[in-house]
Image (cartoon, rainbow, N blue to C red):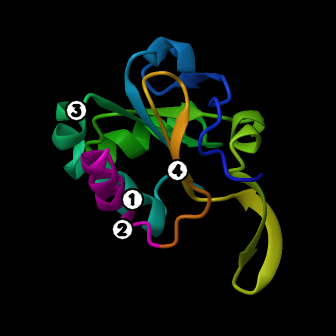
Amino acid sequence: MSDLEGKKAPEFTLEGSDGTFHSLRDYAGKTVVLYFYPKDNTPGCTKEACGFRDLHRELLAMDAVVLGVSKDSLKAHGSFIEKFGLPFVLLSDLSTEVMKAYGAFGEKKMYGKTTQGTIRSTVIIAPDGRVVKHWPTVKKAESHPQEVVEFLKAL
């Protein structure tokens, strides 16, 4: 999918690790950091999630909500959250419909092979529902959360 910046963020409703359904409209008036990642408990995804965990207070102070999205089950999300003390909700997109709407699922290269899967990416959605920043491909999972914070500080 082409860059989403400046466009209205695609609406979604997904079940969260907290047992409730979350929709974008639930966060109207807040900045939403929506990050897409391939799989719970894998090295890169763990580094990225723990980075957002470590910066969580700073993000809250900027009135930003972090939501992670993968196609993992709620059970997998629960164990990932517990193991690493993640203070934010992880959403389960089993159908990959939401990931596709955000350009976070499709063709990618892994170990030189072309495959279909989740593309590590992030969007920042402004309080008015517009995408103000889109990283269509996140290259360095471990440093990306700090990159998000720096972007938000510059807003």
Which residue appears farthest toward the bottom when viewing the image? 112
Query: Is the Cβ of the residue at disc 2 closer than 8 Å to that at disc 4?
Result: no
Of circles 1 and 4, which is in front?
4
Label located before the other in sequence (3 or 2): 3
Q: Amino acid at mark 3?
A: Leu
Q: Which mark is residue 144?
A: none
Quarter where residue 67 is shown: top left
Q: Which residues are magenta?
A: 140-155
The reply to whether dot 3 and dot 2 touch (C-beta < 8 Å) is no
Q: What secondary structure is marked by label 4?
A: strand
Nearer the viewer's eye, disc 2 or disc 4? Answer: 4
Is residue 12 found left or right of 45 in the rendered image? right
Judged from the image, the secondary structure of the residue bearing numbered disc 1 is helix
Residue 10 drawn above or below residue 105: above
User: First in sequence: mark 1 or mark 4?
Assistant: 1
Crowding at dot 2, Cα within 10 Å, few <14 / some 14-19 / many 20+, comes out as some
Q: Which residue is labeled 4 in the image?
A: 122
Looking at the rendered structure, the kind of residue marked 2 is: Glu
Residue at image coords 60%, 45%: 5
Residue 91 left/right relative to 99: left
Q: Position of residue 74 (x, y in %)?
A: 54, 31
Q: Is residue 44 left or right of residue 36?
A: left
- Secondary structure state at the residue bearing disc 2: loop
Mark nearer the viewer, 3 or 1: 3
Disc number placed over residue 60 in the picture, else none: 3
